[in-house]
Every structure is written in C-alpha cells, then in structure tokens.
Image (tube, grey):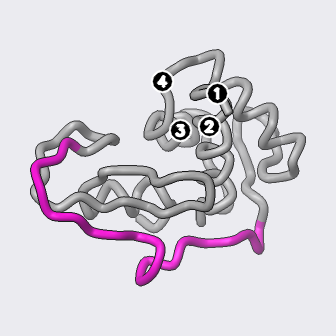
Amino acid sequence: MSDREAKKELALELLAHIEDEELSLAEIIDRLEAVTTSPSLTREILDDAEKRGLIEREDGRLRTRTGGTFVRFESQVVQKKGAFTCRRCGASISTGHFVQFQSDELGPFGPSCVRKVLGRE
C-alpha cells in the first residue's frame, strides 16, 4: 500500500470514529490535517468518505454517520512519555497521546487536542 493510500485509510478511520454529529467543512479539515495537509488528498478522503457512507454533505456542513464507532480511550488511546510535538497544534509535549486504529496509529497529540480531533470536546 502506498503512503498516500495508507494516509487515506487512516483518515477514513478517523472520520468513522468522530463523535460529533455535524461539523463544518473547516472543522473536518482541521481534523484531517492530523493525517494530511494535501488539499488533493483531503478531497479524495472526503469523496471516499461520502461514497462509504461515513459522511453526508449538505450546504457546507458535513454530517457524520450516527451510531458509528467511537474510540475507547481506555484501550485505543495510548500514552507514551518522551519529547513530542503535537500533530494538531505544534506544541511541545512530554506525554504523547496516540490513537490506535486498525490501519495505523495516529499521533502524537496533547490531551486536549486528542479529544478535539476525535470530537470529544
């Protein structure tokens, strides 16, 4: 699997686990930037997410699939000690939070950013 395909699958898993029911396009892109900053890949991810039924687009808003899966913080978010940079905000952190998905691991994030990315804030 190419790096591009691996990123796409990871982003699709992230979208499948977002707990917010409705988000603006900007909010979705903010979350996808944890995986990629490529505009063309982001478009592909959103198109594939719509085809797979993970999201519905309407008037610049995106609705996530209700009743979808969610991340179990106790088992799917692993904390690691070290010197990290948060993938979302760029802050230096000494404890990285990594989300364990089937296709790959996503992180590191600080404690508030991991919640924001997953729609828990």
How far apart marks 1 and 3 lie (CA) works out to 18 Å
The answer to whether the residues at label 4 and label 1 have Cβ atoms under 8 Å apart is no
Mark pair 2, 4: CA separation? 14 Å
Residue 76 within the magenta-colored segment of the rendering: yes
Label placed on residue 44? none
Decide which of tag 2 and tag 4 comes sooner along the chain. Answer: 2
What is the x, y in percent for residue 34? Answer: 44, 40
Secondary structure beneath label 4: loop
Q: In which quadrant is the C terminus drawn?
A: bottom left
Q: How many labels does the image show?
A: 4
Q: Mark 1 points at which residue?
A: 2
Label 2 with label 4: CB-CB less than 8 Å = no
Relative to residue 110, is residue 70 depicted above or below?
Answer: below
Looking at the rendered structure, the kind of residue marked 2 is Ala
User: Magenta span covers which residues?
Assistant: 66-85
Residue at mark 4: 37
Location of mark 2 (residue): 6
Q: Position of residue 27 (x, y in %)?
A: 53, 41
Residue 50 sits above or below residue 105 on the image: above
Earlier residue among tags 4 and 3? 3
Q: What element carries label 1?
A: loop
SS at badge 2: helix
Asked if the residue under mark 3 is in contact with the one under mark 1, i.e. CB atoms within 8 Å, the reply is no
Residue at (22%, 64%) from the top-left corner?
A: 80
**Classed neighbour count for the residue bearing mark 3: other residues with Cα under 10 Å, few (<14), some (14–19), many (≥20):** many
Residue at x 89%, y 41% (from the top left corner): 51
* Circle 3: element type: helix
Q: Which residue in the protein does label 3 denote?
A: 32
